[in-house]
Amino acid sequence: MSCRCFISLNKAAYQFILASCRWIAFRRRVLTGRAQIPTHYLQDASLCYEGEAPAAELQSDVFFREGLAPGGQVTYTPRLLALDLKGSLQTLKQEGCLYSTEQEDSTFTWQGDVVTHTEAPADKNSFLQDLDRMDMGELLAEPDFRTLPAPPTQSSSGAAVAVETVNSTLERLQRSYRLESSVRVWSDFLRLHLHPQSISIINQYNHDGEAARLEAFGQGEALLQGAVLEELEDRLHFFIEECDYLQGFHVLCDMADGFSGLGSKVTELLQDSYGGRGILTWGAAPISHPDSSPVKEVYHMMNSALGMVHMANHSSFFCPLTLRGGLGRRAAPPTGFPLLNYDAALWYHSSAVLALALDTLTVPYRLRQNGAPMWQLADALTVSGRKVVSAYGCVPFPIMRDARLPDALLACGDALPWRPLSGCPELPGARRYGQSVTLRGLEGRSLVSPRVPGAEPSSILHCAQSGEEVLHTHLYTHHPSTPGAVQVVSYPSKLTPPFPQIFSSVLDSQGLIQNQTHTAAAAAVPVSSVPVLSSLRSSSSTSHFLSELQRSCSSVNLRRLSHAFLSHGEPSEISESLEQLRTLAYCYRDDSGGTLRSSDEDDDDDE
């Protein structure tokens, strides 16, 4: 179910994405990681059309490119490169079907007998079957909703109506999809058509089975050379040459297996070739692995540690994305959210939660107005060499229908509402060196409290004049010395099939909390959008997080690791990388007395 390398790119003032999952899309971002996160994230339901006023806040062209198929049809596909393993595509064609010709050249010069062996195609789940029927016009007339036209202008009312018809049809179908038992790979729930240059298959390793598995960091490092490197560079240049302004790269990488090594070499390549651009790298890790064992868990931990060190060195910042309680041996229980009922054992569920958070975390450099470029966001969070940042989120943000943002924040009490999305819990008294906070999904009257002439405001939050001021004031009351930026976007995170229905029954279709009299009616309506609050942060809590991972890895007898793990790296090289991790952890130490240091950290100082 893992996918390996993903790169996404876009046009003016956009970014590039390269990922070690099975995708690479160009939004002028680069992603390396498990592909189920970008599959949820890049579904075309999240596109913002000019006809939708709130959607104009965000730029779709940051990720998507307009093109023409051979037949003259307008296409709108993600700027994406996807690296995956042999046997991982299942029902998806590597070259896609947008640019395929009706007839292929079948001229043979051989005069003898010809025997054709045809492998039975993989079975398609109900969602993919419906997509095929829509393509044939059985369920949906033109345009094909996976081959979207260019975003309509204000005068393109007909195109805007067509898009709305597509979304309405999908919403009516949503409740029938329950793919938990049928999703094996990311393409099992992919709605987007991809460009023929997007998917690249690594044939040296298998996706399934016990033989030829990409399980070690060194194996992934050794991959990016020869034909694999040449193909990656060619596809990369194809998308980059379309960009009038390349802002940077967004990399989503799987940390737990050999793709951590491949992602490290990819970020090194990007740094060498495009050193002046932003390289934002996200490392994905599931809560649990199928068919795991104590030995495999050690490999997962070592891959995560080595990948974090190397990708942080070659990136503008590195941010882990996981709902695990940590990446070391003493992991806490998975992150829970009050309004979610997700299955921690299913990557299909946990990747959907992380995708919702990532969709909000990346808002600052996708804004149409007043956006921050990627390098500026990274520089604000990585002062003094602190290249590892942590993500936090409130998915969905808990607010009653007809309630106001000040009341919703005060209802959280003394604690901030978000939960860790990087396996790094916030320690009491931790010092924050910088943060970027984004709230999306609330608009108009919901953001501020009404002013009653002659009445005394019930709190300082009720005095604020805008949503940004409300959120900034709330953060200041908790951490007055923390520098940071706040963004408030009214456009919510859109959910369309087959996004898993993992939400509490108290939510209505817009992800808002209903009162008790409406709960029964709301339970029958699928959630189609949600408000989300997220935060990217650099804090002294990262010191404990990194130190715990370094200590867990240092306790492993490196000479007892398998030949596959050590075939491309000596134990001394691994020890050196773990020492770099320890040095990185020290960068986050707060010696001002603001953070209580654990006994383990005190022991480290005494050594």
Image (spheres, rainbow, N blue to C red):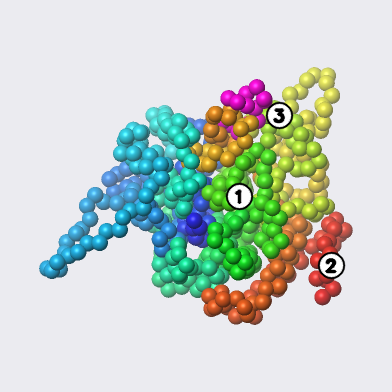
Between disc 2 and disc 3, whose residue precedes?
3
Q: Residues within 10 Å of mark 2 (few under 14, many from 20)?
A: few
Left/right placement of residue 450 relative to residue 592 reads left
Mark 3: which amino acid? Arg
Mark 2: which amino acid? Asp
Compared to residue 138, the image places residue 27 above or below, namely below
Left/right placement of residue 297 relative to residue 151 reads right
Which residue: 81% across, 41% down?
414
Tell me where the magenta segment starts and ends, as one range.
Answer: 509-521
Left/right placement of residue 137 relative to residue 295 reads left
The percent position of residue 332, horizontal first and vertical second, equals 71, 55
Observer able to see residue 63: no
- Spot the residue most to the top: 453
Q: Do the residues labelled 2 and 3 touch (CB within 8 Å)?
A: no
Front: mark 1 or 2: 1
Disc 2 element: helix
* Quadrant, the C terminus: bottom right
As measured in the structure, the alpha-carbon distance from the residue carrying label 2 to the one carrying label 3 is 45 Å
Residue located beneath label 3 in the image? 404
As measured in the structure, the alpha-carbon distance from the residue carrying label 1 to the one carrying label 3 is 32 Å
Q: In which quarter of the image is residue 248?
A: bottom right
Residue located beneath label 2 in the image? 602
Residue located beneath label 1 in the image? 344
Between disc 1 and disc 3, whose residue precedes?
1
Mark 1: which amino acid? Ala
Observer able to see residue 126: yes
The percent position of residue 139, horizontal first and vertical second, equals 35, 33
Q: Residue 53 carries which label?
A: none
Between disc 1 and disc 2, whose residue precedes?
1
Disc 1 element: loop
